[in-house]
Amino acid sequence: METDRLLAGAEDGHAGDHGSGSATSRRDSRVSRRMSYSAAGNWCHLNGDNEDLNIQQAVVFIEDAIHYRSINHRVDASSLQLYRWYYSRICQWSLGTVIAVVLLLAFVERPSSLSISSDPHHRTIPWEPPCGATESVEMLCLIVFCLDLAVKSYLIGWEEFRKSKWLISYTVVVFVSVIDWVLSVSMVCDEKLRVRRLVRPFFLLQNSSLMKKTLKCIRRTLPEIASVILLLALHLCLFTMIGMLLFAKNEDPKKNGEWELHFRDMTTSLTSLLVLLTTANNPDVMIPAYSINRGYSIFFITFSVIGTYCLMNLLTAIIYNQFRGYLLMSVQTSIIRRRLGIRAAFHVLSSHGVQAESQEHVSMNTVLQVMSRIHMKSYYKSAITASAQQFAEQGYMNRMQFRRIFDELDKDCVKEHPPLPQYTSATLQKLQVIFSHYYICVLGNLVALANVICICTVLVLNSEKSTAERDNYLLEVINLCFILFYLFEMSVKIFAFGWRGYLSYRSNIFDGFLTILLLVLQIAIFITYWLPHSQWYPSSHDVISLWEMVRLVNMLIVFRFLRIIPDIKLMALVASTLLDLVKNLRAFAGVLVVVYYVFAVFGIWLFEGAIKPPPEMSVLSLENITSNFSTVCGTYEQLGYWPNNFDDFAAAIILLYDVMIVNNWQAFMEAYSRYTSEWSKIYFVCWWLTSSVMWVNLFVALILENFIYKWDRSHSCSVTDVEKIQYETSVQFMFKEQIQEPTEEELVCQLHQHPHLRLHW
C-alpha cells in the first residue's frame, strides 16, 4: 500500500545491524528456510505446498516494485486478488474520477460559478442546483471514499493502519465530511459554512504517493525557508521605521505627498514596502519623494537591491538546495521499495524446498510463469523476458541473476525507429537515400521559413487595409504553392521511411497532420470560391468569408513553423524540458491545486459579496461613483477590477492567480482592506508567501534540475538524438547517479519487518 514509511534509512540503522547479524548467524548454521501462512494469525509462511500462491505473491511483489509501492500488505490468496483489483487501471481511474467530481462540485454549489461573466455589472443570476442534487452526488463520492478506506485498511492490517498517519487522517476527513453533510441536509442547504469543502483536497493528496512525498519534502524545507523569511521581515521592518522617519509629516503640505500616500502609519508603510519588494508599485512608491529630492531614491534603491535582488534570490537558492536534497531522499525510498519488491519475489519463488543459502535458485519455468501474469509495459516485459532467456540452458537463476534481469526496469526507455523499407530497384534505392537525407529536413525548414516571411510581408502591406480592401487572391496563390511543396515533402518522406517509420517521429506526425489539414482547407476554398463563381467576391457568399479561411490557413502555416524545434539542438532541449514538466511534475501541480482550492474556499468564506459596486455605475463612465477612492489612480475601482472577486469559486481562482503574478496585487489588497478590515491584508500576504515566494521558487528549482539533467545527457548527443531524451526522463532518472543502492543485509532486515510474512532462517 501507499504508506509513507521509509523502508530504509538512518532511523533504522540499529535494527538493520541487528537483523544483519542474526541473518549471518543463521546462514552459517545453514538452517533450512520456511515461510508459512496461518489464516487465524494473518501470517504468511511459504513451504512450497501451494506453488500457485507463491507465484501470485511474486507477481504482486514485482508489480509493487514496478510502481514503487510498499510490500507491507497481506499476502494470502484472497487478499492478493483484492489487492490487484484495487490497483487495476479501471479501479484507479474510477477512484480518480470520483475525486475529480467531488472537487468540481465547488463550481456548482452555492455560490455557483455557472455564469458567463464574473463582473457584477454583467453577471446574470447563475443557475444553482436544487437542494439535494449536489448533496446526493457528494454522498455517493463519500461512499466510494469509505469503501476505499476500508479496502486500504484491510489490505495493510490493523498494525500498519495505526502507524499510517495518512490513513488515520483519511478516516477523520471522511468522518467530518459525513457529519457536515448531515448538518447541511438537515438545514435544507441553507448553511453559510461548509467545512467539508475545505477538506476535499485531502482526497486528492492521499491518493498520490508522489504528492505525499512532495508535501513531506516541502514541510521539511520550511525551516530553512522560514529563516530567510524572518530575515526578509527584519529587513522590511528596519526600512519601514527608517522610511517613517524620513517621510514624516511636514508643515509644508506640498512635501507631504510621500507621507500621505505611502507612509501615513505603520500598516501603510509596511504594505507599501512589502509591495515594493515584489516591484509591483515601482516606481510609483518613489515618485512623490523623488520629485522633491533625488537623493530619496537611494532609500528605495537600497531597499530593492537588498530585498528583491539579494534576499529573494537567496531564498530561491536555499529552496533549490534543500528541496533537491529532500526530493533525492524521497527518490531513494522509491528505489529501495523497488529493490525490496524484487528481493521479496525471489524469496517466495525460491522457497520450494530445503536449500542452503548458496543453493538458492528459481527455475526458468517459474520465472516465465510470473512474467506472463505481470501487468507492465510491453517493452519492459519484452526486455526482461529476453534477459531471462540467457539462462534457459542453465534452467534456473540465482538471486543475483534474478535481480539483474529486473534491472531492465531502471534502464532508459529509448524509442527505436523501425528499419527503412527495402526496394529492389536501383533507382528507387538511390531516391530513398536522397529523400531520407537530413538535408531534406533542412530544405523543408527553409521553405517553411520562406512561407512565414511571405505571410509577414503581406500582413505588413495590408495592415492599414480593411477586410474588403485586402487582395486575398495573391496570398491564397502563394499559400497554395507552399502547401503543394509540403504535400510533396510528406510524400517523399513516406516513400523513404515507410508509413511506420514516418509515424515513429513525433515531428512528422505534427507536420503531416497540419499538411493534411491545410490541404483540406485549400480544397474547401477552391470548391467554395472558384468552382461556382467567376468573380472573386467573398462578400457575396453567406458561408465563411475568404479572408477568414485564408486567415485560418495562415495561422496553421505559422503554427507549422514549430517543426524546426526538433532540428535545433538547444531549442529541442528546451522544448523537451517543457514537455517533461507536464509529464513528470504532475505531483507538484497537484499540490498547487490543493493550495489554490484551500485558499479559494477561505477567500469565499471571508470576502464573498464584500465588494459591491454602486448600482448606478456605468461601464464607460466613473462620474457617479460615490466611493471616496474612485478618482485615485491605480485603485481597484479606477482600474475596473470588478470581475476579480470572491463571489464564486471560479472568480476566486482567477483572483488568486492574479495575486500570484504580483502585478498590481496591491490594488486587491488595498480594496479588500477598505471594504472589510485591515486584517484582510494577512490573507493576501499569506497567499503571496505561499504561491509567489514558495511555490514559484520551487517550480524554478525543479525546472533547473530538469534542464541541467537534460543538458548533461545531451551535451554529447547529436541533433537527431535529442528527441530520444524525451522518452528517458523521469524523476527517478534525474537522480539516478546520486542514488545509493541498498545492501543485501538492509533488504533482509526489511523483509524480517514485514507485518504479514514470517521468515525462519
Image (spheres, rainbow, N blue to C red):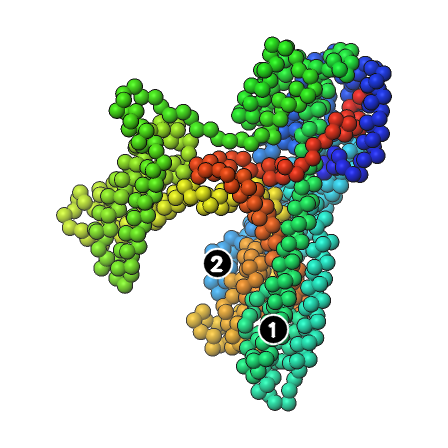
Left or right of residue 209, residue 581 in this image: left
What residue does disc 2 label? Answer: 117
Return the residue at label 1.
300
Q: Residue at x 49, y 55 (%)?
A: 115
* In this view, 677 is above or below 499: below
Q: Quadrant of the C terminus?
A: top right
Residue at the outermost left position: 534
Comparing 229 with 167, the one in front is 229
Residue 601: percent from left, percent from top: 63, 55
- Splitting the image into 4 quarters, where does residue 86 fall? top right
Q: Position of residue 490 (x, y in %)?
A: 32, 35
- Identified at 21% across, 51% down, the residue is 474
In this view, 639 is above or below 715: below
Is residue 147 something that shows in the picture?
no
The first of marks 2 and 1 along the sequence is 2
Is the Cβ of the residue at disc 2 closer than 8 Å to that at disc 1? no
Which residue is rendered at x = 37% and y = 25% of the image? 420
- Residue 654 in the figure: left or right of residue 302: left
Q: Secondary structure at mark 2?
A: loop
Q: Position of residue 429 (x, y in %)?
A: 30, 24
Categorize mark 2 by other alpha carbons within 10 Å: few (<14), some (14-19), many (20+): some
Query: In which quadrant of the rendered image does the N terminus lie?
Result: top right
Viewer can see residue 397: yes
Residue 198 numbered tag:
none
Say if 245 sits above or below 319 in the image. Answer: below
Which residue is painted at 55% across and 70% down in the image? 282
Front-most of residues 52 and 708: 708
